[in-house]
Amino acid sequence: MEILERVKEVLPRGVVSKVELEGSEVVVYTRDEKFFLEHGEIVKEAVKTLKKRIEVRAERELCLPQEEAEEKIRKLVPEEASIKYVKFEPERSIVIVGAEKPGIVIGKKGEKLREIKRETFWTPRIERIPPIQSDVVKGIRGLLLRESKFRKAFLNRVGKNIFSERKTGRDWVRIICLGGCREVGRSCMLLETPKSKILIDCGVNVGGKDSGMLPFFNTKEFDYTELDAIVVSHAHLDHIGAVPLLYEYGYDGPLYLTPPTVDLATLLWLDYIDVMQKSMEKPLFTARGVKEAVKHAITLDYGEVSDIAPDVRLTFENAGHVLGSALIHLHIGEGLHNILYALDQKFGRTTLLDPACTNFQRNETVIIEATYGKAGDVMPSRREAEQQLMEVVNRTMERGGVALIPAFAVERAQEVMAILAENDFQYPVYVDGMIWDANAIFTTYPEYLSKRVMKKIFAGENPFLKPIFKRIASASDREKAREDRPCVIISTSGMLVGGPVIEHLRALAEDERSTLIFCGYQCEGTLGSRIQKGWREIPYQTEEGKTITVPLKMEVATIDGLSGHSGRNQLIAFIGNLRARPERVLVVHGEAQKTVDLASTLAKIFRVEAYAPRNLEAVRLR
């Protein structure tokens, strides 16, 4: 391929033994020891010339034998790094070092990494060992190591696709709305460019049934075999829930997401299968689809620019919504058009995350959410919301009750935990469902939390390790937790559509001392939404299959302002604070009235074209 030949041309003669593609990255293998150790400035110039990422690795025969290399690494790295494993990918000349304190393995300005390369000729990759053990993180890392031969061939195939010359009959850039327009749920958009097709998000409607659950895959414009890539913004089922299904259909291309998102998404996918099976319903996909999604995942950090198709370049930036959530910036062609996909997002500081990024040089089209987009969707300040939460919780503690908080396992549960920890809460806080597993993933990626929280964690003050937090691991644990009064129970699911929270609610419903506290969005049609609107009877099925009701005598409280979504004013402020003013704004991910209302407001304030598209509508951007 042309790019590989050009790499050989710009590097010194005789130092390159072979050149391969790993996705958008060019990997140069060498048998020249001096070049491997001193290639820095030469490769910098090559990157400037070619505008492609280049990594130099030693050929396998240069690398120390694995046992010797591991022994050398353990001697080079101080003991306080707490190295737990050293593993090798010989096909790629990579050594993986897992440590509790990866910063010590890296060393000041990367000094230790350079020393490892110099002494072993292996290229090091560092993995953090989380203080809370995560079976999901461990399983994913093990899978990728076992599949290293497949991954190498897969990444090479992706690279060839990215750098291929391709002609189509298209001369346009357009978005086709496959889900999530004038509704909340099943977010999914198909981007067509002159040379590529990219799927942006691929979610399910959690409260939906049958045809209303999945994106509109049956439209003639959608064919998964034509996709160059799937790009997902964050790990919530309404954005990633249908991804494994496409792999079971037969899609075998790349899935782009941030490192925390692949771990959290896997956790949610596996939990979804479990919940469906326990509900005697057939899951949309199986563990095979999840495995294939993980095997085909390509992770990018915030700010990392990567080609993902012949004419599309991707950059993720912080969205402030959940751990690893990303604003998706797509640069199409050589300056032809730029799209900023800005959902879900929070343009405001939270306990755990910094606000959504607005520093984009170009974004002709912005796609924004309207979850809280209509007039009147103005949230109280963060401080007021946290004070209200603590007042309700403390009031419940004083009367000897249980504060039951339905929470999304990813982000909202951790946000509530962090608020309790920061307020020096002293009563036991029981964590149920997969929240504990999500906590483990949060402790794996402190660099994706806010700068303030990250500094505290590195200083030994991890909010998730407070002794007040206790794990519920069984049905008997649930009963014991409810008896350990007063206490807080944080449990999935966040909208009362299943999960262990239903068992807690059924047991506590008639207890007037206890409180049901909503602190997240409740989709229309869910039990949570109905209770917020005044329902005071809880239906459930007995083991015999009969539906009976339990009167709801608990106090019911809703805490506005803790949402991971931007309120109306924050959405407007986000557009106003963008470094480059868009030409067009598409408003999605909200009830019909809210999307239309926000689009009208944005058009008036910023004098831009603003529109709330419908599902199955195609919007031409260029």
Image (cartoon, rainbow, N blue to C red):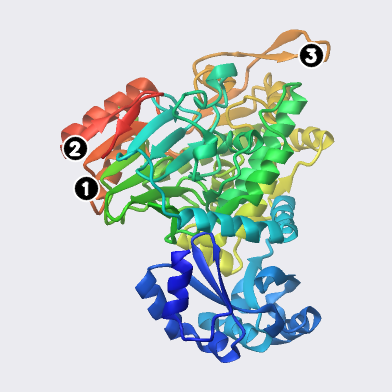
Q: Please report the residue visible at 54 percent of the width from the left and 88 percent of the height from the top.
A: 35
Q: Say how many tags the image has.
A: 3
Residue ID for mark 2? 608
Q: Distance of mark 1 from mark 3, alpha carbons?
A: 56 Å
- Amino acid under label 3? Thr
Of the numbered discs 3 and 2, the one sitting upstream in the chain is 3
Q: From the top left corner, tell me how far across and down residue 604 is, in percent.
A: 17, 32
Q: Quadrant of residue 547?
A: top right
164 vs 429, left or right, is: left
Q: From the top left corner, tell me how far across and down residue 460 is, in percent.
A: 61, 67
Of the numbered discs 1 and 3, the one sitting upstream in the chain is 3
In the displayed structure, would residue 101 be above or below residue 469? below
Residue ID for mark 1? 581
Q: Distance of mark 3 from mark 2, alpha carbons?
A: 55 Å
Q: Quadrant of residue 518?
A: top right
Along the line of sight, the residue nearer the viewer: 312 or 431: 312
Residue ID for mark 3? 542
Q: Quadrant of the C terminus?
A: top left
Please, what secondary structure does the residue beneath circle 3 have?
Answer: loop
Question: Nearer the viewer's eye, disc 1 or disc 3?
Answer: 1
Q: Distance of mark 1 from mark 2, alpha carbons?
A: 9 Å
Along the line of sight, the residue nearer the viewer: 505 or 377: 377
Task: Residue 427: tell me if it is visible.
Answer: no
Q: Please report the residue visible at 74 percent of the width from the left and 82 percent of the height from the top.
A: 69
Q: Quadrant of residue 155?
A: bottom right
Question: Badges 1 and 2: C-beta atoms under 8 Å apart?
Answer: yes
Q: From the top left corner, tell me how far across and down residue 98 is, in percent.
A: 70, 69
